[in-house]
């Protein structure tokens, strides 16, 4: 059976969406069935076995506005995500104390619902790293090998 992977993005300026598009292409080429949601809702991720969240950090360490409603709904949800395996890719700037804090928010929120984080999250420092796509692609095997 082909493994299906759901990718959702949290993006303010589009950077996370570009990375997600690239990851989507790479996984598709590797034979995975991939779904990509840039405005994900709770129903988009319910029942999914594999999830990758690609998100930037907004403001003072918050989730971007396009993904915040999903995580509000998740917090209030009674859904069980015990069968979900997830990984997180974060984009942020080490110029801020809250570097990639959205990654922590995502990890905590999904774990609180029983989801299993399968590998170390990737935190991309956009100040010093200009090849986000390649960096994300190099992280992918850590996620894929745990599926």
Image (spheres, helix red, strand yellow):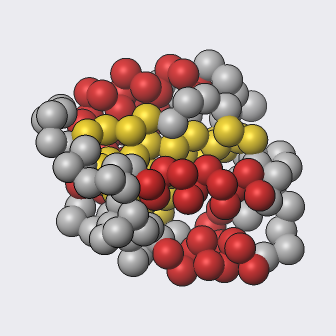
Residue 24 position within the rendered picture, expressed as x and y whole percent measured from the top left: 41, 42
Q: Residue at x 35, y 32 (%)?
A: 136
Does residue 26 appear anywhere in the picture? yes
Residue 25 position within the rendered picture, expressed as x and y whole percent measured from the top left: 36, 38
Q: Residue at x 20, y 43 (%)?
A: 126
Q: Nearer the viewer, residue 121 or 44?
A: 121
Query: Across the whole image, how many numbered discs are drawn on residues?
Result: 0
Q: Nearer the viewer, residue 58 or 39?
A: 58
**Residue 78 appears left or right of 147:** right
- Quadrant in the picture for the N terminus: top right
Q: Residue at x 54, y 80 (%)?
A: 69
**123 is higher (above) or lower (below) than 147:** below
Q: Nearer the viewer, residue 22 or 134?
A: 134
Residue 132 position within the rendered picture, expressed as x and y whole percent measured from the top left: 24, 37
Name the outermost residue toward the front: 97
Residue 118 position within the rendered picture, expressed as x and y whole percent measured from the top left: 67, 32
**118 is higher (above) or lower (below) than 46:** above
**Residue 102 appears left or right of 143:** left
Q: Residue at x 51, y 36 (%)?
A: 121
**105 is higher (above) or lower (below) than 41:** above
Q: Nearer the viewer, residue 126 or 134?
A: 126
- Quadrant in the picture for the C terminus: top right
Does residue 34 appear anywhere in the picture? no
């Amino acid at each position: 059976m082909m493994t299906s992977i759901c990718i959702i993005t949290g993006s303010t300026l589009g950077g996370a969406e570009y990375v997600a598009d690239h990851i989507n292409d790479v996984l598709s080429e590797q034979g995975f069935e991939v779904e990509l949601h840039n405005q994900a809702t709770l129903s988009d991720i319910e029942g999914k076995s594999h999830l990758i969240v690609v998100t930037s950090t907004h403001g003072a360490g918050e989730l971007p506005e396009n993904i915040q409603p999903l995580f509000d709904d998740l917090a209030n949800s009674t859904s069980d995500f015990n069968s979900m395996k997830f990984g997180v890719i974060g984009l942020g700037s080490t110029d801020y104390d809250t570097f990639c804090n959205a990654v922590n928010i995502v990890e905590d929120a999904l774990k609180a619902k029983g989801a299993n984080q399968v590998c170390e999250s990737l935190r991309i420092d956009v100040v010093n790293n200009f090849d986000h796509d390649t960096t994300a692609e190099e992280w992918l095997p850590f996620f894929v090998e745990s599926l």
